Image (tube, rainbow, N blue to C red):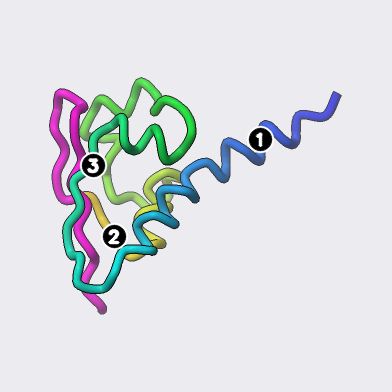
Amino acid sequence: MNVQPARQRRSLKYIRLAAFLAGQVANVARIEMTAEEIEDLVGEKLPPGAKFPSWWRNDVRKMHARAWLTAGWEVDGFDPGGEGVVFVRRSAP
């Protein structure tokens, strides 16, 4: 039995979020998204840990955070009720 496709899907699911963020026009500096909107983008429910601020840290070691960081964005705010996340465009170094 080959488990590679499932592993590949898990590692690639946040690419849709990265593509959405990367595709924003240059003058968009802030995006608020609900958990439901993010789930629609990635094609499945967010994990239970996404209800906690720690999941939304801008930590490049985390696969899901690498998606928004690589796209040039970072999380600037999180609603502890899990209803919303604020992404802001990262400034150029």
Residue 50 appears at what percent x and percent y? Answer: 31, 29
Q: Amino acid at mark 2?
A: Trp
Q: Earlier in the sequence, mark 2 or mark 3?
A: 3
User: On screen, 31 above or below 27?
Assistant: above
Q: Amino acid at mark 3?
A: Met
How far is disc 2 from disc 1 in space, using C-alphas? 25 Å
Closer to viewer: mark 1 or mark 3? 3
Quarter in which the N terminus is drawn:
top right
Give the numbered dot on residue 33: 3
- Number of labelled discs? 3
* Mark 3 surroundings: few (<14), some (14-19) or many (≥20) residues within 10 A: some
Q: Which residue is pictured at 57% across the width and 42% down the height?
A: 11
Residue 34 relative to residue 65: left or right:
left
Residue 2 relative to residue 30: left or right:
right
Closer to viewer: mark 2 or mark 3? 3
State the image quarter where residue 18 is shown: bottom left
- Residue 44 or residue 54, whichever sits in front: 44
How far is disc 2 from disc 3 in space, using C-alphas? 13 Å
Residue matched to label 1: 7
Residue matched to label 2: 73
Residue 72 appears at what percent x and percent y? Answer: 33, 65
Q: Earlier in the sequence, mark 1 or mark 3?
A: 1
Residue 21 appears at what percent x and percent y? Answer: 34, 57
Q: Which residue is pictured at 29% across the width and 50% down the height?
A: 58
Residue 66 relative to residue 8: left or right:
left
Circle 3 sits in a helix, a strand or a loop, which is it? Answer: strand
* Mark 1 surroundings: few (<14), some (14-19) or many (≥20) residues within 10 A: few
Residue 89 appears at what percent x and percent y? Answer: 23, 64
Residue 88 highlighted magenta (yes or no): yes
User: On screen, 85 above or below 50?
Assistant: below
Circle 2 sits in a helix, a strand or a loop, which is it? Answer: strand
Magenta part of the chain: 76-93
